[in-house]
Image (cartoon, rainbow, N blue to C red):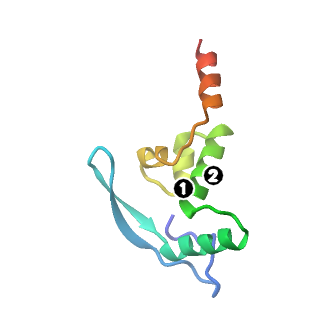
Amino acid sequence: MPRTRLLLTHRGGGFELVRKRRTLPDGRQVDYWAADALEARFRELYRAAGIKTSSHAGRRSFASALLKNGVSLEQVAILLGHQDTEVTSAYIQVEKKQLRAMYELAL
Protein backbone atom coordinates (compact mmCIF):
# COMPACT_ATOMS: atom_id res chain seq x y z
CA MET A 1 0.00 0.00 0.00
CA PRO A 2 2.33 2.70 -1.26
CA ARG A 3 0.42 5.65 0.21
CA THR A 4 0.18 4.24 3.74
CA ARG A 5 2.38 6.02 6.29
CA LEU A 6 2.53 3.35 8.98
CA LEU A 7 6.27 3.79 9.46
CA LEU A 8 7.92 7.16 9.14
CA THR A 9 11.46 8.36 8.52
CA HIS A 10 13.39 10.14 11.27
CA ARG A 11 12.07 13.38 9.74
CA GLY A 12 8.45 12.26 10.07
CA GLY A 13 7.80 11.63 6.39
CA GLY A 14 7.10 8.52 4.41
CA PHE A 15 9.81 6.30 2.98
CA GLU A 16 10.44 6.72 -0.74
CA LEU A 17 9.02 3.90 -2.81
CA VAL A 18 10.57 2.63 -6.02
CA ARG A 19 8.78 0.43 -8.53
CA LYS A 20 10.78 -2.70 -9.30
CA ARG A 21 10.24 -5.81 -11.41
CA ARG A 22 10.77 -9.45 -10.40
CA THR A 23 10.65 -12.62 -12.50
CA LEU A 24 8.64 -15.42 -10.90
CA PRO A 25 9.77 -19.07 -11.12
CA ASP A 26 7.25 -19.67 -13.93
CA GLY A 27 8.81 -16.85 -15.99
CA ARG A 28 6.09 -14.24 -15.43
CA GLN A 29 7.26 -10.76 -14.51
CA VAL A 30 5.54 -8.79 -11.77
CA ASP A 31 6.00 -5.21 -10.68
CA TYR A 32 6.22 -4.32 -7.01
CA TRP A 33 7.02 -1.39 -4.76
CA ALA A 34 10.21 -1.38 -2.69
CA ALA A 35 11.37 0.94 0.06
CA ASP A 36 15.11 0.35 0.17
CA ALA A 37 15.63 2.99 2.89
CA LEU A 38 13.01 1.27 5.05
CA GLU A 39 14.75 -2.07 4.59
CA ALA A 40 18.04 -0.45 5.62
CA ARG A 41 16.33 0.98 8.72
CA PHE A 42 15.12 -2.47 9.73
CA ARG A 43 18.67 -3.83 9.32
CA GLU A 44 19.86 -1.06 11.68
CA LEU A 45 17.14 -1.89 14.21
CA TYR A 46 17.92 -5.62 14.11
CA ARG A 47 21.64 -4.91 14.54
CA ALA A 48 21.01 -2.49 17.44
CA ALA A 49 18.84 -5.13 19.14
CA GLY A 50 21.53 -7.76 18.68
CA ILE A 51 19.34 -9.83 16.36
CA LYS A 52 21.32 -11.53 13.62
CA THR A 53 18.82 -11.59 10.78
CA SER A 54 17.84 -9.75 7.63
CA SER A 55 14.74 -7.74 6.87
CA HIS A 56 13.54 -10.53 4.60
CA ALA A 57 14.10 -13.13 7.32
CA GLY A 58 11.94 -10.97 9.58
CA ARG A 59 9.25 -10.85 6.89
CA ARG A 60 9.44 -14.64 6.47
CA SER A 61 9.05 -15.15 10.22
CA PHE A 62 6.11 -12.72 10.29
CA ALA A 63 4.40 -14.46 7.36
CA SER A 64 4.97 -17.93 8.79
CA ALA A 65 3.64 -16.91 12.22
CA LEU A 66 0.52 -15.44 10.63
CA LEU A 67 -0.20 -18.65 8.73
CA LYS A 68 0.52 -20.77 11.79
CA ASN A 69 -2.11 -18.73 13.65
CA GLY A 70 -4.81 -19.27 11.04
CA VAL A 71 -4.46 -16.24 8.78
CA SER A 72 -5.13 -17.16 5.14
CA LEU A 73 -2.42 -16.94 2.49
CA GLU A 74 -4.42 -14.20 0.74
CA GLN A 75 -4.52 -12.13 3.92
CA VAL A 76 -0.79 -12.66 4.50
CA ALA A 77 -0.16 -11.48 0.93
CA ILE A 78 -2.08 -8.28 1.64
CA LEU A 79 -0.15 -7.66 4.86
CA LEU A 80 3.16 -8.16 3.06
CA GLY A 81 2.06 -5.91 0.21
CA HIS A 82 2.12 -8.66 -2.41
CA GLN A 83 -0.32 -8.69 -5.31
CA ASP A 84 0.34 -12.36 -6.08
CA THR A 85 0.10 -15.16 -3.49
CA GLU A 86 2.80 -17.01 -5.44
CA VAL A 87 5.26 -14.34 -4.33
CA THR A 88 3.99 -14.69 -0.76
CA SER A 89 4.39 -18.47 -0.77
CA ALA A 90 8.14 -18.00 -1.25
CA TYR A 91 8.24 -16.29 2.18
CA ILE A 92 6.55 -19.12 4.05
CA GLN A 93 8.45 -21.56 6.25
CA VAL A 94 6.38 -24.59 7.17
CA GLU A 95 7.58 -26.62 10.14
CA LYS A 96 7.67 -30.42 9.89
CA LYS A 97 5.47 -30.58 13.00
CA GLN A 98 2.81 -28.52 11.20
CA LEU A 99 2.98 -30.76 8.13
CA ARG A 100 2.57 -33.88 10.26
CA ALA A 101 -0.45 -32.36 12.05
CA MET A 102 -2.07 -31.42 8.72
CA TYR A 103 -1.39 -34.91 7.35
CA GLU A 104 -2.91 -36.60 10.41
CA LEU A 105 -5.90 -34.26 10.27
CA ALA A 106 -6.49 -35.21 6.62
CA LEU A 107 -6.56 -38.93 7.47
Q: Does 33 sit above or below residue 14?
A: above
Q: Nearer the viewer, residue 28 or 53?
A: 53
Q: Name the residue: 42% across, 44% down.
A: 86
Q: Secondary structure at mark 2?
A: helix
For this view, does 102 lie left or right of residue 30? right
Pointer 1 local density, CA inside 10 Å: few below 14, some 14–19, many at least 20 = some
For this view, does 73 lie left or right of residue 44? left
Residue at the outermost top position? 107
Residue 107 position within the rendered picture, expressed as x and y whole percent measured from the top left: 59, 11
- Give the CA distance from mark 1 to mark 2: 9 Å
Q: Quadrant of residue 33?
A: bottom left
- Give the numbered dot on residue 107: none
Q: Which residue is mark 1?
A: 80
Q: Name the residue: 48% across, 73% down.
A: 36
Q: Quadrant of residue 18?
A: bottom left
Residue 66 position within the rendered picture, expressed as x and y whole percent measured from the top left: 64, 45
Q: Nearer the viewer, residue 46 or 65?
A: 46
Residue 14 position within the rendered picture, expressed as x and y whole percent measured from the top left: 56, 78
Residue at the outermost bottom position? 11
The answer to whether marks 1 and 2 mark residues whose Cβ atoms lie closer than 8 Å is yes
Q: Nearer the viewer, residue 32 or 105?
A: 105
Residue 60 position within the rendered picture, expressed as x and y whole percent measured from the top left: 57, 51
Q: Which residue is mark 2?
A: 62
First along the sequence among labels 1 and 2: 2
> Which label lies toward us, 1 or 2?
2
| Type of the residue with mark 1 | Leu
Q: Secondary structure at mark 1?
A: helix
Pointer 2 local density, CA inside 10 Å: few below 14, some 14–19, many at least 20 = some
Residue at the outermost right position? 49
For this view, does 13 lie left or right of residue 89? right
